[in-house]
Amino acid sequence: MMHLFKKVHKWVGLLIGAQVLLWLLSGLMISLLDPEKVSGNQWAFKTSTVPQTLEPMVLLEPAELPQNLLKDALGIELTDRYGKPFYLVRHANSESLIDAMNASVVEIEQSWAEQAARKDFIGIGEVVSIESGMAPDRETRDSEGAYWRVNFSDMVNTAIYISASTGEILERRNSFWRVRDFFWMLHIMDYPDRENFNNPLVITVALIAIWLGISGFMLLFGSFTRSDFFFLKIPGKTDEVVITLTGPGVRKPKTVKLRKGSNLFLSLATHDVSLASICGGGGECGKCRVKIESSHWPEANAIELGLVPKRLREQGYRLACQQKAERDMTLNLPEGTLVSSP
């Protein structure tokens, strides 16, 4: 059971680790992008912040507007569109732009959208195409209603979105924004909509990460022994055991001193004794079998019961990755592990 628990922990850790790496990478990329370029403001015409004075005598009062245009209106606002005064009338599901001088309803046609985009864009590039669409979509998810998309031929593929009902600029999009939007999607893991930070996938990964931490803490007790904290011991006072290594074709056994309680597989590797392994000592492949020459063999654990046949266990075979150097012992290693002495 513990073997399965450990395996699940390892693979889940790999998946969560990959997502964390993706999260860090995407966060780094987002932080490196210039916000002015991402927003498109670097290539946008800077309007004056000084209030524009309009001649009141030439403007119609809101009460003078046709009543059919004001019916069920939620609000009316005097606004400016490139130096000309207009009334913006808001209804529950629509908006209308009315000329403040003659009360005519303004239709935002393709030519208006092109003119508005040209006035706004100060970068190097010409209009190459104009498309109509309906928001919200991928690049206009914060807006609603019909729009005109004016595409420019600049180096960053600028697209300016003009509202088809009010003539205002809805969005400025370019390659910097699209790159940022892609990494933002990876960062918040909202792949369909790219805007909900509290989406179910993020919550699921967070819960799995919590489980990973708890399971790792539980596995901690089976992965460490008191001897692993040797650096806390009094300097000069060390406990060592002598391990004698032999095997087929070895005329002169080799002896090594290992720290008492250390893992046989890892400790032997520090003495240039590399045992066969596919899993790197993870207790999964069963390749690091060694024969303990003793009349009292250590008890086989659950992993060894699954990976070492019974007949071999009864002969003293154990997995080096599962055994500790608790006492002096002789290990009979597989053929070829030790180089014969001359």
Image (cartoon, grey):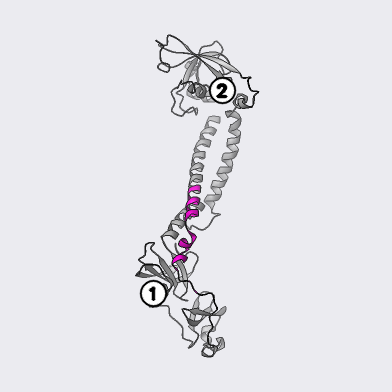
Q: Secondary structure at mark 1?
A: helix
Tell whether position 25 is magenta: yes
Question: Which is more toward the observer, 208 or 274?
Answer: 274
Task: Count residues near mark 1 (Cα–Cα under 10 Å), then give few for <14, some for 14-19, many for 20+.
Answer: many
Q: Is residue 125 left or right of residue 331?
A: left
The location of residue 54, given as percent across then percent down, is: 53, 85
Q: Residue at x 51, y 58 (%)?
A: 195
Q: Can the viewer see residue 1?
A: no
Query: In this view of the protein, can residue 239 be seen by the observer?
Result: yes
Q: Which residues are magenta?
A: 24-48
Residue 297 in the magenta stretch? The answer is: no
Q: Position of residue 329 (x, y in %)?
A: 54, 13
Q: Position of residue 61 (x, y in %)?
A: 55, 88
Given residues 28 and 137, the one toward you in this image is: 28
Q: Which mark is residue 114?
A: 1
Please state which of residues 118 and 88 is positioned toward the viewer in this rendering.
118
Q: Earlier in the sequence, mark 1 or mark 2?
A: 1
Tell me the chief SS of the magenta region: helix
How many marks do you count on the picture? 2
Q: Is residue 99 above or below residue 285?
A: below
Q: Position of residue 257 (x, y in %)?
A: 54, 17
Q: Quadrant of the C terminus?
A: top left
Q: Quadrant of the N terminus?
A: top right
Q: Is residue 254 left or right of residue 213?
A: left
Residue bearing the label numbered 2: 262
- When the figure is inspected, residue 222 is found, relative to residue 45, above or below; the finding is above
Q: Please say if 17 is above or below 141.
A: above
Say which amino acid is labelled 1. Answer: Glu
**Residue type beneath disc 2:** Ser
Q: Which type of secondary structure does the marked residue at label 2 adopt? A: loop
- Disc 2 residue crowd, few under 14, some 14–19, many 20+, Cα 10 Å: many
**55 above or below 140?**
below
